[in-house]
Image (tube, grey):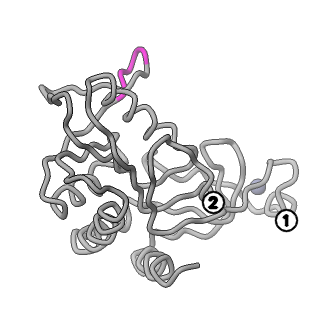
Amino acid sequence: MTPQAESVLELFRSTGAYLEGHFRLTSGLHSSTYLQCALVLQHPAAAAKLAGMLAEEIRKLAAARIELVVAPALGGLIIGHEVARALGTRFLFTERDAATSKMALRRGFTVGPGEIAVVIEDVITTGGSTRDVIDLLRAAGVNVVAAGSIIDRSGGRADVGVSRAALATLQVAAHYPEECPLCQRGIPVVKPGSRPT
Ligand code: ZN
């Protein structure tokens, strides 16, 4: 793991955002660790620090001057906004339509053909949300030059079709419930994430 990734994970640990226990992931798999970005990003200073690092990585990937940062709501809102601040660009977010689950720009947001954009997320797992945002922007003529996330949970494998940066790349061990060592030890499983606690 790089020194940068170590310092990012230390920031997650010190803010209680690096959870250890027995978790049921969205995929249905079980894992002993879970990164809850909202818990580190609740601290604006930490959000600004992570965004500064991510903006620097993005600049290394993109030769052109970036004009726009776009992030999928809700996960990408805080980090996307802070990366836009660090890059000196405006910031837009996309939302999924409740009925069709298609990604859309709402709230009067507009983009112009030829605008140079990057897409930012908190965590990339499969890259699906980032790819959906890229497709939406490309359909509007926007030139998406790079994508970035604080955490890459895919072990570096997620392919979003453009150059991609992450501050910490993890290979999170996950097990099918029937093969889960924590289940076998009788430890209750919990679902972390966006539901009320
Ligand atoms: Zn389990």
- Image coordinates for residue 191, horizontal then vertical, percent: 59, 50
Q: Is residue 31 above or below residue 131?
A: below
**Label 1, on which residue?**
185
Q: Magenta span has 2?
A: no
Q: What segment carries the magenta color?
A: 96-100
Q: Earlier in the sequence, mark 2 or mark 1?
A: 2
* Quadrant of res 47: bottom left
Left or right of 147 on screen, residue 68: left
- Image coordinates for residue 76, horizontal then vertical, percent: 34, 49
Number of numbered discs visible in the structure rendering: 2
Looking at the rendered structure, the secondary structure element under dot 2 is: loop
Looking at the rendered structure, the secondary structure element under dot 1 is: loop
Amino acid type at circle 2 is Gly
State how far apart marks 2 and 1 are (Cα).
27 Å
Q: Is residue 88 above or below residue 67?
A: below
Q: Residue at x 40, y 55 (%)?
A: 148
- Mark drawn on residue 123: none
Amino acid type at circle 1 is Arg
- Mark drawn on residue 155: 2
Q: Residue at x 21, y 26 (%)?
A: 106
Left or right of 105 on screen, residue 98: right
Q: Quadrant of the N terminus?
A: bottom right
Q: Residue at x 12, y 25 (%)?
A: 108
Farthest residue, direction front: 63
Front label number (2 vs 1): 2
* Quadrant of res 182: bottom right
* Quadrant of res 102: top left
Q: Is residue 96 above or below residue 18?
A: above
Residue at mark 1: C-beta within 8 A of ligand 1: no
Q: Main secondary structure of the magenta part?
A: loop
Q: Quadrant of ligand 1?
A: bottom right
